[in-house]
Amino acid sequence: MSITTVFGVHGANIEDLFDAAVRVDEMTPVIAKHEFAAGAMADGTARITGRPTVVMTTSGGGAMNVIPALAESYDSRVPVIALIGTAPSSFVGRGAFQDMLSPPDTVDIAGVVGGVTGSCSVVTRPDDVPAALATAFATTRRGLPAAVLLPKDVQSAQLPDVHVSIHPAIASPPTTDDVPAALLAAVADELCSTAESVGDVVIWAGDEASVAGIGSAIDRLAQALSAVVVVAPGGRDILRDAPGYAGVTGVMGHPSAHRALAAATVCLVIGCRMSMTDRAGLDDVLADKRVVHLGFEPPRMPGTADHIRCGAIEPTVDHLTSAVRERMRGRPRRRTTMEITHLGTRPPTTHLDMRTVIDELGAALPAGTTVFADAGNAGAAAIHHLPFGHGRFVVALGMGGMGYGVAAGIGNAIRSVADADPRRTVVIAGDGAFFMHGMELHTAIEHDAPVTVVVLNNNAHAMCITREKRFFPGTPSINRFRYTDVAAGLAAMFDGLTVVHVSDRDALRPAVADLLSRAGPNCLVVDVDPDEIPPFAPLLEREDHS
């Protein structure tokens, strides 16, 4: 296990750890502009690498600012370790600045952090450090974030000469051998029986499958069963533009994916929690369906699926595929042909519409490009319209925090440089998300990170405008903003940063190609219409019937 990059914001009660990080040749400390962004950088990096990452913050406001990022990591099961500095031990309970360890007189930081992590260790002396770190790493092996609270005097003390195990035996996920062979055999029998009869099998993959990188394994299983594959938004990068793939589920997904699930006899869920953002619009369909669930975490729809807990998900899928092939030998079946259908049509507008922007961007993405989508209309457009097969795709729908994608994508790009494997990351965000955490572009510039930030600027919180019009008709909008020239502002602020502003399709295509071919960070700003209806099924259905 190797941690090459740590993210955070410097401060008095964490400065000793940053001093230590600077002295480690193999480690790159990254100073973000905001602690939420630092936490999102760590979160995004962990999702791409599958390794634990570290965020470091000082006490007080710094510690409180990182809480939303840790909440996202907790809800999405991302292994982030937060090292949070606290006031010196001798000052605790004596009115120290930013004392957070003497509740109820002070904020109970251990209680706050403990609510958004799988473990929170409070270190009181140097001898406690090894056990606290062992607990933190054990927690990340369960797919959860962890926190260690470190008083400033402990940070600067001499660590005891003991070995710190970061691979503790406790709390490790089960291996394939922990899934009884008889149970997998029974699942294989049921799937094959369905495939041989008039029934259809649908495989539904999610975040856990994406992080594990098992797209090829899922395709082999689907081929063996002649099954259709659909994915949750977090498993989008498993999809291919090929027969047998029916699209993304949920309100931002594709009608074809919902039709495939509705027609299925058996649904095999792989690494998908079946949260509301995964399954919205499907509750009635799933209630009458035979559902088998493979994954480390159980589904968030109790009583609808038989859950088979497996930590080593790829070997489990491979073993299941082998069992299916053995049973289906000599009985060839043709893979079902599916065509992915999209919501809505291109709107008449004087601006570029979001689908056009996403189409042109997707067509130019080099193979292997990682894309981070932010919240709101921009994220919905990316989930729904981005072509498949470019590389990893990350969207944080656990908390749905605006600005996450901007920071997380930049963090991943910086990490790729630290890992001596620089690869371009693309961020797709709206202007609302950009105004929250877009100044992390400064962090990208400081580290010459290979990232392209695409800002779809409609001078509004356009998702909120759509909801205002649909659900509060006649009420004056409070979500339209005066025009902001984001491109000119960035160009003026950051000398040497390549920023391109386009407003028509003829200029868009060469601009995208040019930016993706460059080194270092750059930004594309595209004007879009605040009244464009995003690809959300409930909103479009209301539009169609208005």
Image: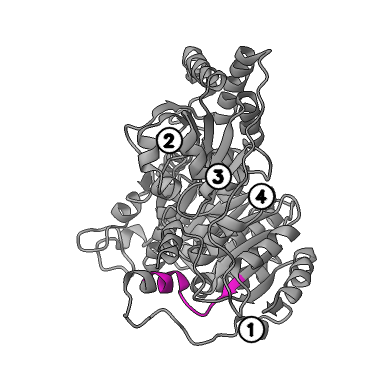
Q: Is residue 152 visible?
A: no
Find out whether the residues at labels 1 and 3 contact each other: C-beta distance under 8 Å: no
Q: Mark 4 highlights which residue?
A: 388
Snapshot quadrant of residue 339:
top right
The answer to whether residue 166 is magenta is: no
**C-alpha distance separating marks 2 and 1:** 45 Å
Numbered circle sitting on residue 493: 1
- Real-space Cα distance between discs 3 and 4? 11 Å
Name the residue carrying label 2: 297
Which percent across, then down, holds residue 358?
64, 63
| Of the image marks 2 and 1, the number of the one nearer the N terminus | 2
Question: Which is more toward the observer, 437 or 52?
Answer: 437
Characterize the local packing of mark 2: few (<14), some (14-19) or many (20 or more) Cα atoms within 10 angstroms. Answer: some
Residue 80 position within the rendered picture, expressed as x and y whole percent measured from the top left? 49, 49
Q: Would you say the residues marked 3 and 4 are in contact, meaning their CB atoms lie under 8 Å apart?
A: no
Residue ID at (66%, 70%): 446
- Report x, y in % for residue 462: 47, 73
Mark 3 and mark 4 lie on one chain; the one further toward the N terminus is 3
- Image position of 76 (left or right of 415): left
Report the residue at 70% width, 54% height from top: 369
Q: Marks 3 and 2: in contact by CB < 8 Å?
A: no
Q: CA distance from mark 1 to mark 4?
A: 35 Å
> In front: mark 1 or mark 4?
4
Q: Classify residue 515 as left or right of residue 13.
A: right
Given the image, on which type of amino acid does mark 2 rest?
Answer: Glu
Label 3 crowd bin: few (<14), some (14–19), many (20+), radius 10 Å: many
Query: Magenta stretch?
Result: 455-467
Task: Give the residue pinned by disc 3.
Answer: 235
